[in-house]
Image (tube, rainbow, N blue to C red):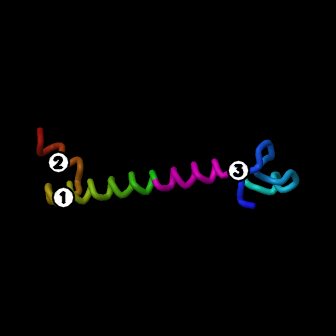
């Protein structure tokens, strides 16, 4: 009963059109996760810069280095 049928498609013929392609959904979810990770990294980087320099003025830190 639970064995695989050889030579038969995994879906029934008429039901195959009712399913949605999961690839675009997976790519969208992947891009959301990556953008969330990049945003979190940027926030942590900005916070660490603020903690080490004491200011969030980027132009001011450039002038101090020169």
Rounded to the nearest angstrom, the CA distance separating label 1 from label 3 is: 49 Å
Q: Earlier in the sequence, mark 2 or mark 3?
A: 3
Which residue shows up at 77% across the image and 49% down it?
Answer: 5
Q: Earlier in the sequence, mark 1 or mark 3?
A: 3
Residue 43 occupies quadrant: bottom left
Q: Which residue is mark 2?
A: 61
Task: Give the x, y percent position of residue 55.
Answer: 18, 58
Task: Give the x, y percent position of residue 48.
Answer: 21, 57
Q: Which residue is mark 3?
A: 21
Q: Nearer the viewer, residue 51 or 36?
A: 36
Residue sticking out furthest to the right: 14
Q: Please tell me the numbered disc located at residue 55.
A: 1
Other residues around mark 1 within 10 Å, as few (<14) / some (14–19) / many (≥20): few
Which residue shows up at 62% across the image and 53% down it?
Answer: 25
The magenta-colored residue range is 21-33
Element class at badge 3: loop
Rounded to the nearest angstrom, the CA distance separating label 2 from label 3 is: 50 Å
Mark 2 or 3, closer to the camera: 3
């Amino acid at each position: 009963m639970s064995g695989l049928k050889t030579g038969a498609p995994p879906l029934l013929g008429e039901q195959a059109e009712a399913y949605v392609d999961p690839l675009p959904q997976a790519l969208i979810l992947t891009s959301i996760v990556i953008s969330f990770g990049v945003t979190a990294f940027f926030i942590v980087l900005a916070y660490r810069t603020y903690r080490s320099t004491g200011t969030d003025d980027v132009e001011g830190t450039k002038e101090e280095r020169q």
